[in-house]
Amino acid sequence: MSEPRHATISSRLARLRKELADLELDALIVPRFDAHQGEYVAPHDERLRFVTGFTGSAGAAIVTADTARLFVDGRYTVQAQNQCPPDLVERDHLFENPPESWLANVASDAWSIGYDAMLLPPSWVSRFEKALEPVGAELKPLSHNPVDSIWADQPEEPFGWISAFPVQFAGRSIEEKRKFLLEVLQEEGADFIVETQPDNIAWLLNVRGDDVAYNPMPQSFLMLDRKGSGHWFVDRAKFEDGLSDTLPNWLSIHPKSAFLETLEGAFEGSARVLLDPDFSPAAVSQLVTRMHGAPVHKPSPVTRAKAAKNATELEGLRACHLEDAVAWAEFGSWLQSTVPARAASGEPVSEYEAEQKILEYRKARAGFLSESFRTISCSGSNAAMCHYAADPVASASIQPTAPFLLDSGGQYETGTTDATRSYCFGSLPDGYTEAYTAVFKALVALATLRFPKGTQGHHIDAICRRPLWDLGLDYDHGTGHGIGHRLSVHEQPQRIGKPYNPVDLAPGMVLSIEPGFYKAGHFGIRLENLFEIREEQDGFLSFGNLTLIPIQTDALVLDRLSETEIGWLDDYHATVLDLTAHKCSEEARKWLSSACAPLVRSRSGLQRVV
């Protein structure tokens, strides 16, 4: 931690504590969320980063008169340690010792604890209230954020253009989606639904935007009543020419700043309002209650409907994954030839250069728009940090003596991609080949699974982890996440992981499978493909592969592979070669042919065909 950075965080915490004292607050909850409770936020909403220095995409802090405590999950343990001054910001695990539990242990009945009611969802408020009830401390919603009061150079709110997303890509019209939502309101006996998730609103209205990096959706709010009248809270100045003509006449446009005021005028005393308890501002729920209405806290029906991709969306996802595969093939060819040569010349390839190279190859592909997240390009021990970001000026070099990991994705006109590959160039650190083989076996174990309807992600997580568990290894992140259709790279509600997630996996859902292993200070391994869930003739479900990128075989311990695993890999590589080779440059085709060479058994054992 540099001295200037330490001094900056120290100064900000001191100013924030003075602000809390002026407001007669004993503590402040500072989440990573913005008013939409999403994973990615605009610079304007990076309050957690401003206060603590932590730049990760998930976490929360609690600031008191004498303590600042940051809570992050296992993906960010090392990152938080590197970014936050330990004498200023203490660290804890977001799930093992959640912030509400810690706060309940340090607070007294005289405490007043503030939070921005537009940033915390009702489920978080409920957790804090339940934890603090035995203590007697007061949880106080705030209409103005104290961090904003001390943030003199806070960036402006984002301004990205909003465009229509044609039905030829969306597959369903706005009217079809509105009809579905009105049916939900009738079934629930609800008068209104308030939707605050930008990707859900973009899906409903068949629009896309550019407010937050990597997320092609506008930041906005939406309300629909049971009579079919809709209200969209968004900056009209962002509309591209012609967008207004594509919007229905039942939809009224309001400034975002008029959101709560308009809701207050619309809700009558007995109004029942559908709200997502995890992905909506607590301020809305509190407003409904204040107006003597009834907040109906249920997961957004839009989230579930959006998750099951229609035939047009799936066709678009398959098409963009094919384009993305060509970019990966060009990158793989460049990487394997360039890293050893440049290292020998004394001018090694840097992590950031590799990050820019995959972007360069993507830009050459049809329909490419942007990255779907900041590429994770990391060599050697840096790969042990799951969400590492290479320094554009002073990133580490990629050496033939250390493995390299690249996690990268793209936003295309017809969909979103995300994949991870681990590469090696020569000698490997102790334990790497055994772990790499286990990670590969874990990927195949889940990729080849058939499962009945009604299966949920936590039911099958252990199937993926077992090859690692057999070696006494594990990874502290989820096994799989949903992915959007030219929307968020991490999409709710489907996921695969250890935590309970009561969402049935269903045909049309798209998920990643991404087991890994990370040895702090030494290396990191992750293999990630995206899959669509398909229904088979007997009614069982299976994973249909979307990702078409070679899986390096050099680090596999071949005699630990089963016939099923060998067959899966050979079939996979044959498909990759068949679908992508003709689209690649001659040099990349040669590399691809070698990278996709089948594994065969001979009398002397398992061998690679060269």
Image (spheres, rainbow, N blue to C red):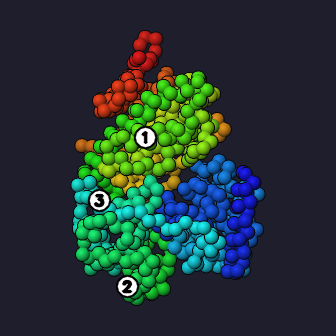
State which quarter of the image contains the C terminus: top left
Q: Name the mark on residue 517.
A: none
How far apart, in angstroms, are the residues tagged by discs 3 and 1? 25 Å
Judge whether residue 467 can be spotted in this image.
no
Q: Nearer the viewer, residue 38 or 208?
A: 208
Mark number displayed over residue 360: 1
Q: Which disc is residue 266 wearing?
A: 2
Location of residue 546 (image quadrant): top left
Residue 369 in the image: above or below residue 263: above
Which image quadrant is residue 348 in?
A: top right
Mark positioned earlier in the residue sequence (3 or 1): 3
Image depth: mark 2 or mark 1 in front: 1
Query: Is there any visible trace of residue 415 in the rendered image?
Result: yes
| Residue named by callout 3 | 165
Q: Residue furthest top?
A: 603
| Residue 504 versus residue 198 in the image, above or below | above
Identify the element where label 3 is drawn: loop
At label 1, the amino acid type is Glu
* Image position, residue 210 (x, y; %): 41, 60
Of residues 265 and 463, the one nearer the viewer is: 265
Where does the image place residue 319, in percent across and percent down from the top left? 29, 43
Q: Closer to the N terminus: mark 2 or mark 1? A: 2
Choose the circle earlier in sequence order: 2 or 3: 3
